[in-house]
Amino acid sequence: MRPSSATGSTAAPSALAALAASALASAALFCGAAYAQAPAGAELGPPPAAPAPAPDPAPARVQGPVQAPPPAVPAPAPAVAVPAPSTPPAPAGPASPGASPAQGPGGPAAPSGAPPEILWAKAYGGAGEDAFTHVSATSDGGLVAAGRSASADGDSDGNRGASDAWIVRLDSDGGVVWKRTFGGSDVDYASSVAETADGGFFAAGATRSGDGDFREASGDLSAWAARLDPDGGLLWLKVFGGDVGWEAKAVLEVHDGGFLVMGEVDSPEDGCPDGGPCGNLMVVRLDPDGGTLRVRRPRARATLPGNAAVGIPGGEAAMAYEMYSRDGSPEARVTRAGREGRHLWTRTVASDAASYALATVGKGGSGGFVGAGEASRAPEPGGAAGRRPWIFRLNPDGALLWEALPLGGASGEFRGVAVADGGFFAVGAAENLAGDGAGHYDILAAFADSGGAALWTLALGGSGMDWASSAAAPPGGALYIGGTTNSSDGDFAWRARAGDRPDADGLVVKLARPAAAHGDE
């Protein structure tokens, strides 16, 4: 979440920040040049014109069959219809100063179809507080999820302290293939995980422990990275940083079989803008055996999520992030880097906005990039600006093609985005979708066509805090939402029948594949 700004953006409530603490994951890809050397705010070019948008309805609550979850979690009941928001969403007006106009920052026309069928929704965890912050598809049609677990039972592999880093391997039906925790006596968590070319896995996160699996850590906040075999066996685990706060928040396997670990390093000596971050970007280049080849700490005040790093065939990579100026005002930026981290370009996509997720479009990124996050926009001309779930598309050179708010005036953000059947699948959370008071968040999913027009939206939630942090769309497969739920009613009433699970659980929802959206995959 980004801080309040003069244009009316509001910061997240503390309860939401606590539930999704490690969902604020990071990425920084340009190893070869410091951020201060990168050209920013390059000319974006005029986006295509678009017809005037129509008002967006409330996200649908889908009724449909839901398959049984794992044995510890009874089958979910059909989703419950929820009243529309107290203030119906409306199309937004012109972009705020500094942002390129697009297909109307208020978004394209209202969703034109019903959301797909929910195939299953399953919770993972135990009696403690558990959360998934990153879920990604695997080559065999399954999933791998990363997060944190404070449970010593259920789907956790034991508990060594306050919370442990948690990796769970799932099959295509949501069954647990294996589970793995890493921890010490203090707070530990995993921010990102990815399958490697040989079928194993690479994960990273942060630890405050100086014992247990992290006995090499300083006891302050240190970053860690781990290599796992296909069965979850630990091949190696490396800890780095700790002189100040280090957090690893995103990972990529690079062209030579090595790895990039990306995140943030505290830099309090630089001073902090009001409400802005104190940290610099952090990029660590590792060889295949975990040896450190290079550490870069470009000077940039930024917040970088774990879904925002993407690899490009041939050794290139790109990232999306939220950059802060000296006065604390945020900007959504995207950087593309060549082989060995050589900087190619940096673009300021929009001011008073944050980019939290990025995906490549077309084969090898030939269609550019789609990003998602939040932007402070007015839902109607002359209205007050506020945080809105936001998507945008760039061409391969970083020029803005369009930006859109698929949900109109709802307050919230997208945290994950994926490309599927020529369209774009974005997930996150929005406030008060059920009309039951400010401060309540539900999971939000939306599907837009290649031009940004919303085809459908979907809301899932109950009376607790529900949050989507990651989207996955494996080729030819279903759509997956990864996140966290603290509800045991509404759409998640089935959790109440799962025994003693009073705190949050990791969550995965599987949706049927939508019809083709007639665009680039």
Image (spheres, helix red, strand yellow):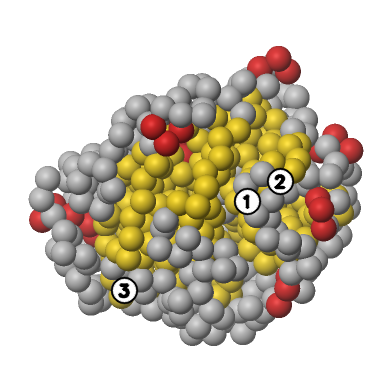
The residue pinned by badge 2 equals: 285
For this rendering, which residue is in front, 357 or 70?
70
The residue pinned by badge 3 equals: 173
Say which of marks 2 and 3 sits in front.
2
Q: Give the Cα distance between marks 1 and 2.
A: 11 Å
What is the secondary structure assignment of the residue under circle 2? strand
Type of amino acid at the residue the image marks with label 1? Asp
For this rendering, which residue is in front, 489 or 184?
184
Q: Residue at x 67, y 67 (%)?
A: 360
How many discs mark residues in the rendered view? 3
Residue 157 appearing in the image: yes
Can you tell which mark lies on residue 334?
none
Q: Give the Cα distance between marks 3 and 1.
A: 33 Å
Q: Answer with the quarter of the image where residue 80 lies.
A: bottom left
Type of amino acid at the residue the image marks with label 2? Arg
Measuring from the top left, give residue 340's x and y in whole percent: 81, 53
Can you tell which mark lies on residue 289?
1
Measuring from the top left, give residue 114's x and y in whole percent: 39, 76
Q: Answer with the quarter of the image where residue 393 lies.
A: bottom right
Type of amino acid at the residue the image marks with label 3? Asp
Mark 2, Cα crowd under 10 Å, few <14 / some 14-19 / many 20+, is many
Seen in the picture, residue 139 relative to 355 is either above or below; the reply is below
Mark 3, Cα crowd under 10 Å, few <14 / some 14-19 / many 20+, is some
